[in-house]
Image: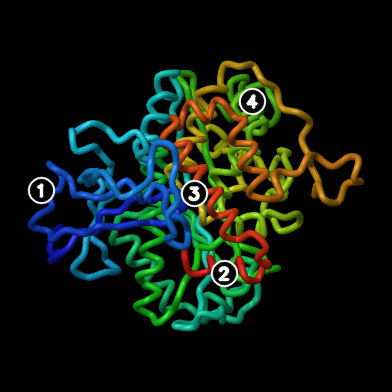
Amino acid sequence: MAGRIVHGVALTWVDNAGITRVKTVPFARLADAARWGVGMSPVFDVFGVDDSITTSRHIGGPVGDLRLRPDLDRLTVLAGQPGWAWAPVDRWTQEGEPYVACQRRFARAMTERAASAGLSLRMAFEIEWYVGQAPDDDPRPACVGPAYGMTRIVELSAYLDDLLTTLEAQGVAVEQLHPEYAAGQLELSIAAADPVTAADDNVLVRQTIRAVAARHGLRVSFAPVVVAGQVGNGAHLHFSVRDANGALFAGGSGPYGLTERGESVLAATLERLPALCAIGAPGVASYLRLVPQRWAGAFQCWGHENREAALRFVTGVAGQGDRAANAEIKCCDGAANPYLVAGAVAALVADAADLGRRLPAEVAVDPAALPDAEQPPRLPTSLPEAIAALEADEGLRRALGDPLFEAFLAVRRAEVELFAGKSPEEIAAATRWRY
């Protein structure tokens, strides 16, 4: 807190709809909050993207209370919001027991499960967002330069300078920032960290992007689709794995240097991507984004540096394989709860390393350009398909536990019902400013 006056602390968690919810305390009450927690109803686990409330077998209704305990190790002064600090929370019962449906605790538990198998994970989310004119509800891009064009950096120079300065002041290690393909779209990459820290960073960076934009009279969206029919916002997850012998994705005799355990991890992850879609691409709007030939990874295949494959293998610059080799899961977007994504991938890795699985032949071209008979399977093309795949994945059900698993599915089904019969334009408009 050196040299900065903080009056309030924002205590955040991310619900099953992918919305970052918050309670705040005056700074003077932070120590008390860390010890005893701050009250919050468990009903938020069945809130929908539109703030409607559904229910599930274990969670739902107005009865009960939880305690939000801030993680003081992540306490961060918000340079983009003078007078404020931020900390993510873990959720506990009033009896002082860990809350079984806490998404952040799930990510930590699965990281520990992988560690018990001798596996150490590093993860990083790519964050894509749309910058628009405020306060318009209809999207009007704040810049008009071409995709990946320097013109956008010129147009948004003051905003982006302020953003980089603010993130640096908050201790966030930014690796790169660039214009993306869609109108008004940008992307920022954060340095890799352990799974829980990576998810925390996702939350902190998104809210910082939002705060700095507001300071410049701009409005941002992380929604999967901002304008129907256009390229949407991804939140692709990069991950790598190490064991006592070193990197699993480099130095081996498998494809592109994969070790046997590394190849087994990727093969099993590829097999279970349809189920992971329900967690990484959890909104009805997600399936307006997850379509071929938009670099969204719509096909269930893998490939070395293939940005149309759902699982992209990245070897990195020659000579850096032990540090740079990683896999990118592309079927993740801004509607996802990053703790659930990080935890689910950690669970898949823990399950898979010693199964001896082997990858199928890689797809080295655009899968959509292949003859129909030669194309790999499509990932789910709708949220109901993804839900069915997740329901069939017993490993993820066990990892999540019934209370969290069933509450999550209840929210997903409620969203399917909410948008039944709606046009792509109506779905995009209804979710555009929710994320």
Where residue 355 sits, quadrant-wise, is: top right
Q: Which residue is mark 1?
A: 31
Residue 317 visible in rendering: no
43, above or below 99, in the image? below
Which residue is located at x 44 percent, y 59 percent?
52
What kind of residue is marked 2? Answer: Gln
Closest to the observer: 145 or 7? 7
Answer yes or no: is residue 247 visible.
Answer: yes
* Residue type of the residue flagged with mark 1: Ala
Q: Amino acid at mark 3?
A: Val
The tag earlier along the polypeptide, 2 or 3, is 2
Along the viewing direction, whichever of 216 and 36 lies nearer the viewer: 36
Q: Which mark is residue 185?
A: 2
How far apart are labels 2 and 3 at the CA level?
A: 28 Å
Judged left or right of residue 295, residue 197 is left
In the image, residue 282 above or below residue 344: below
Q: From mark 3 to mark 1, how far is it between C-alphas?
A: 34 Å
Marks 3 and 1 close (CB-CB < 8 Å): no
Q: Nearer the viewer, mark 2 or mark 3?
A: 3
Q: Which residue is mark 4?
A: 263
Q: Which mark is residue 411?
A: 3
Q: Nearer the viewer, mark 4 or mark 3?
A: 3
Marks 4/2: CA–CA distance: 34 Å
Residue 120, quarter of picture: top left
Q: Secondary structure at mark 2?
A: strand
Q: Which residue appears at 65% of the width and 46% of the height? A: 384
**Mark 3 neighbour class, 10 Å CA radius: few under 14, some 14 to 19, many 20 or more:** many
Quadrant showing the N terminus: bottom left
Q: Nearer the viewer, mark 4 or mark 1?
A: 1
Work out whether mark 4 precedes mark 1 in sequence or the reverse, and give the earlier one: 1
Q: Tell whether label 3 touches label 4 (CB within 8 Å).
A: no
Q: Earlier in the sequence, mark 4 or mark 2?
A: 2
